[in-house]
Image: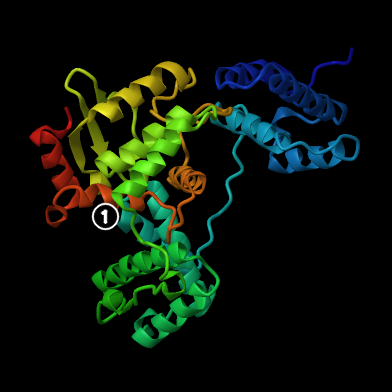
């Protein structure tokens, strides 16, 4: 038996946390042995706890992988321990001075605008920053931005270049992000005119033969295919599809839905929409039954309050809206249906078409269900 290293006393706490997130006994045993190996490695090199850092994690992994095969759990497990120690202040966080380039400064101020004035969610802000950075980097790199010189021709030329290397959906998201950026620049006086209207729409001629929306027959066929699915998460995925089809919810609204949003006695669901908006929507019968079945029989037991939980450890809510899109795409393939996009909006447009779209999707659906269709 060798002496314990500086990390030894912290390993049981992390192991207990992992156990509560649904990891199997085999997975827990491997991660615990990995942590003990790191502790022994640091002890042999007489490294104090304060010396534990991302650099030490990488150094240890290079050492370990010379003898043992690389496992996908290695780096995430060690970095999780590091974060826990930093949060408890047992290890000091290495603060890296932020870059002060004109581009980074603009992005920081744009993010503040999107969060405080537009009320966008962190995931959406991150997406906007990604797309606008691509545009600004292509235009000027990390040097002077010269925003006053922006013009319609330059915007169109940049978008056409980017559209060749990304999907149609990504190109469309980029146009939305750029319109927000140009409104922001005009609002604070960086551009003389509002260039948001200069951002061209993304054409989709190569996909013109595929339907942009689904018919009622196709939607019901998809739902029927989901009901016949026998995968371990079949009930979860069916419930998500029903929320998309019956209530026209956005993917992000489903991701952020919590157990506290369900009022079983009133038969209502609180939906947290864009800009901090909240709506109470009646639960249609089939949606409520599917949701109850998922919560009773399939949802993993965990402390997370999100309604929809990852089936594999760690048991927590979906990180991004893309998880909902993946479920839609999987179901479309299983049902043998092709469409321009495999996103949640396919169902959202269907839900609107069943009501009165001129009033807006949410308002129309709300009124439709209040007229008795939720029974």
In the displayed structure, would residue 259 be above or below residue 59? above
Q: What residue appears at the point 59 percent right and 39 percent down from the top-left corner?
A: 93
| 10 Å crowding of disc 1: few (<14), some (14-19), many (20+) | some
Q: Looking at the image, can residue 259 be seen?
A: no
Q: Badge 1 is on which residue?
A: 118
Instruction: Check the picture and name the quadrant holding the C terminus.
Output: top left
Image quadrant assignment for residue 74: top right
In the displayed structure, would residue 63 be above or below residue 96? above
Side (left or right) of 21 relative to 286: right
Q: Looking at the image, can residue 55 be seen?
A: yes
Q: What residue appears at the point 80 percent right and 39 percent down from the top-left corner?
A: 70
In the displayed structure, would residue 52 be above or below residue 300? below
Q: Residue farthest to the top? A: 1
Q: What residue appears at the point 23 percent right and 32 percent down from the top-left corner?
A: 270
Type of colouring: rainbow
Seen from the viewer's position, the closer of residues 11 and 23 is 23
Seen from the viewer's position, the closer of residues 53 and 92 is 53
Image quadrant assignment for residue 127: bottom left
Name the element at disc 1: loop
User: How far from the left and from the top, in percent, is residue 81?
Assistant: 64, 29
User: How far from the left and from the top, in percent, is residue 94?
Assistant: 61, 43
In the displayed structure, would residue 29 be above or below residue 69? above
User: How far from the left and from the top, in percent, is residue 214?
Assistant: 34, 54
Side (left or right) of 11 relative to 278: right
Side (left or right) of 195 relative to 16: left
Seen from the viewer's position, the closer of residues 142 and 80 is 80
Side (left or right) of 373 relative to 22: left
Seen from the viewer's position, the closer of residues 374 and 8 is 374
């Amino acid at each position: 038996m060798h002496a314990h290293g500086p990390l030894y006393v912290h390993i049981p706490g992390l192991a207990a946390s992992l156990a509560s997130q649904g990891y199997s006994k085999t997975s827990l045993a491997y991660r615990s042995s990995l942590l003990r190996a790191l502790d022994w490695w640091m002890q042999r090199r007489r490294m104090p706890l304060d010396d534990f850092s991302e650099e030490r994690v990488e150094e240890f992994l290079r050492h370990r992988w010379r003898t043992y095969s690389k496992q996908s759990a290695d780096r995430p497990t060690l970095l999780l321990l590091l974060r826990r120690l930093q949060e408890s202040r047992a290890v000091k966080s290495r603060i890296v001075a932020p870059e002060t380039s004109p581009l980074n400064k603009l992005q920081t101020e744009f993010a503040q605008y999107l969060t405080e004035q537009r009320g966008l969610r962190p995931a959406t802000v991150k997406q906007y920053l990604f797309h606008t950075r691509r545009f600004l980097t292509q235009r000027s790199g990390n040097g002077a931005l010269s925003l006053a010189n922006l013009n319609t021709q330059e915007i169109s030329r940049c978008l056409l270049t980017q559209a060749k290397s990304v999907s149609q959906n990504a190109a469309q998201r980029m146009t939305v992000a750029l319109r927000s950026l140009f409104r922001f620049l005009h609002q604070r006086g960086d551009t003389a005119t509002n260039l948001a209207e200069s951002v061209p729409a993304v054409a989709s001629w190569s996909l013109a033969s595929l339907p942009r929306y689904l018919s009622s027959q196709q939607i019901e066929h998809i739902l029927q295919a989901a009901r016949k699915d026998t995968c371990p998460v079949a009930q979860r995925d069916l419930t998500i599809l029903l929320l998309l089809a019956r209530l026209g919810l956005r993917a992000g609204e489903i991701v952020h839905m919590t157990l506290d949003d369900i009022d079983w006695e009133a038969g209502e669901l609180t939906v947290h929409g864009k800009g901090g908006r909240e709506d109470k929507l009646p639960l249609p019968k089939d949606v409520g039954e599917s949701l109850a079945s998922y919560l009773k029989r399939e949802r993993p037991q965990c402390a997370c309050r999100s309604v929809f939980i990852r089936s594999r450890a760690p048991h927590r809510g979906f990180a991004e809206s893309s998880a909902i899109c993946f479920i839609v795409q999987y179901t479309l393939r299983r049902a043998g249906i092709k469409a321009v996009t495999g996103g949640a909006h396919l169902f959202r447009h269907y839900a609107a078409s069943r009501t009165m779209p001129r009033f807006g999707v949410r308002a129309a659906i709300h009124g439709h269900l209040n007229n008795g269709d939720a029974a």
